[in-house]
Image (cartoon, grey):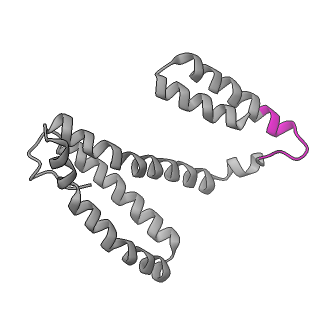
Amino acid sequence: MLAGVVALLLLGITNQAWLPAAGCLLLLVLFLIRIRSAKAPFIQPSLLLNKGYSLGLVIAFLAMGIGYSLPFLSPQLLTYVNRLEPGAAGFALVPAAVMTALLGRKGGKLADKKGNSFLFYTASALLLLCFVLLSSFAGMSPLIMPSS
């Protein structure tokens, strides 16, 4: 049922269709009923009531969504909104690739020094900031627009 919830949610969002979204909600309700009534549920209901865990899930979902969308949306933004040729859009993203390569090692050292949760929250905040900046500078000159 959990796999069905996720599959129908993705189908509803991708196709902008209400029927899969309604099916997702129905399966979610059935899944919640099932995990409350089963002797050994797949997911313990008490786990979902833990506020720290639930907040962590929401933050992880948003961070992963932003993290996976930026490499796909940035070239489209540069091509369709800023009217750059595809080669120029790729070239405009080179500084971001260089910074990723340089900061990857620093991130590992920071995780060792301050802990994984500090690095996770810092990276999540930076991804959110990057997304806000990209949406704020949309349509402006590519020279002004910060690389993602």
Left or right of 18, for residue 66: left
What residue is rendered at 68% in x and 23% in y?
Answer: 26
The magenta segment is: 33-42
Which sits in the foreground, 32 or 94? Answer: 94
Residue 10 image position (x, y, % from top left): 54, 32
Which sits in the foreground, 32 or 93? Answer: 93
Q: Which image quarter is the C terminus in?
A: bottom left
Residue 5 image position (x, y, % from top left): 65, 32
Which sits in the foreground, 54 or 1? Answer: 1
Specify the farthest residue to the front: 87
Q: Is residue 7 above or below residue 26?
A: below
Q: Which image quarter is the N terminus in?
A: top right
Which sits in the foreground, 22 or 79? Answer: 79
What residue is rendered at 60% in x and 50% in y?
Answer: 54
Specify the farthest residue to the right: 39
Residue 53 image position (x, y, % from top left): 62, 55
Residue 35 image position (x, y, % from top left): 80, 39
Magenta-drawn stretch contains 132: no
Image mark count:
0
Q: Is residue 142 above or below residue 110?
A: above
The answer to which image quadrant residue 28 occupies is top right
What residue is rendered at 46% in x and 83% in y?
Answer: 113
Left or right of 144, for residue 121: right
